[in-house]
Amino acid sequence: MKSILEALQSGLYIGDGAMGTQLMELGLAAGSCAEIWNIERKADVVGVLAAYREAGAQALIANTFGGSRWKLKLSGLERSVHEINVAAVEAAREAADRSAWVFGDMGPTGRLVEPLGADPRESFVDVFREQAEALASAGPDAIILETFGSLDEILAALEAAKSTGLPVIASMTYSRDASGGFRTMMGEEISAAAAALVEAGADVIAANCGTGPADYVEITAALVGAVQLPVMVQPNAGVPRLSKGRTVFPMGPEEMAAFVRPIADAGARIIGGCCGTTPAHIRAMRAAASLSG
């Protein structure tokens, strides 16, 4: 396969879908640590990712979204950062079967950078660097920073991830504001956030989660208009709603796939799925993209 950055100079690629909801179908308890499954139930993690690859995904994201020391500490696993992250990349490599890229995944810590929070920026960089180095040691094709709502935090993660020498995909979550535009949870507007990420060295600018694919046509266009880098997007399977105490993502595979061409026409190079998406969604999206192979 071509390197990820070489490939993204042209063409359209399909990513994978949700990990957490798929593991819940296999018995992961809500609120428990999904990342420990990389060790304790590795075959199940491989199975989820292999199903995405068989459905047509050309990029697989390792099960390490909550793999930082601070997040793992919530489950008493803060001493297992290296083991858990390495096992996750190995699982993704096995599932990829040399026919998909593998991205190591880094998500938010759940803390705020000073002065809004108690922890200085240097502590965030240290925590993220520990995870990034563990991921890099297992040989992924890139590191993706996902679902960040704070520019301060993602910039700390980006600094840490770039220190590995791997390509870095920087993905933030945007919601529509009162004016009709899109902003992060902390109020950063798309073009300003994207420009800051480019300046800090991101190789791919991305957006994920938050809302469904209809909004992602606009989000993609805004990102493409703001940067000269490849753009990746991963919308949810519709806007989530509560049904009988459960969070439900209402959009089926064919309905979601109908947005693939509009998002691609807006300029996205990789289109995947976030919360609520399944291998069936990815299969329909791959078909809608009219990709062969």
Image: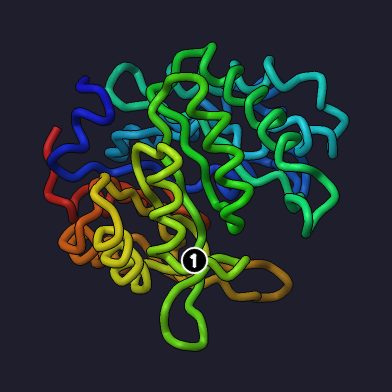
Q: Quadrant of residue 267?
A: bottom left
Between 188 and 142, the one lying in front of the other is: 188
- Figure check: 179 above or below 66: below
Residue at x-position 46% and y-position 58%? 193
Q: Position of residue 168 (x, y in %)?
A: 42, 33
Q: Quadrant of the N terminus?
A: top left
Q: Position of residue 174 (x, y in %)?
A: 49, 66
* Outermost residue toward the bottom in this view: 179
Q: Residues within 10 Å of mark 1 (few under 14, many from 20)?
A: many
Amino acid at the residue labelled 1 = Tyr
Q: Is residue 25 visible?
A: no
Residue 146 in the figure: left or right of residue 251: right
Between 98 and 125, the one lying in front of the other is: 125
Residue at x-position 26% and y-position 66%? 221
Residue at x-position 59% and y-position 16%? 86
- Figure check: 80 above or below 266: above
Number of marks in picture:
1
Q: Is residue 91 visible?
A: yes
Name the residue carrying label 1: 174
Q: Position of residue 108 (x, y in %)?
A: 65, 46
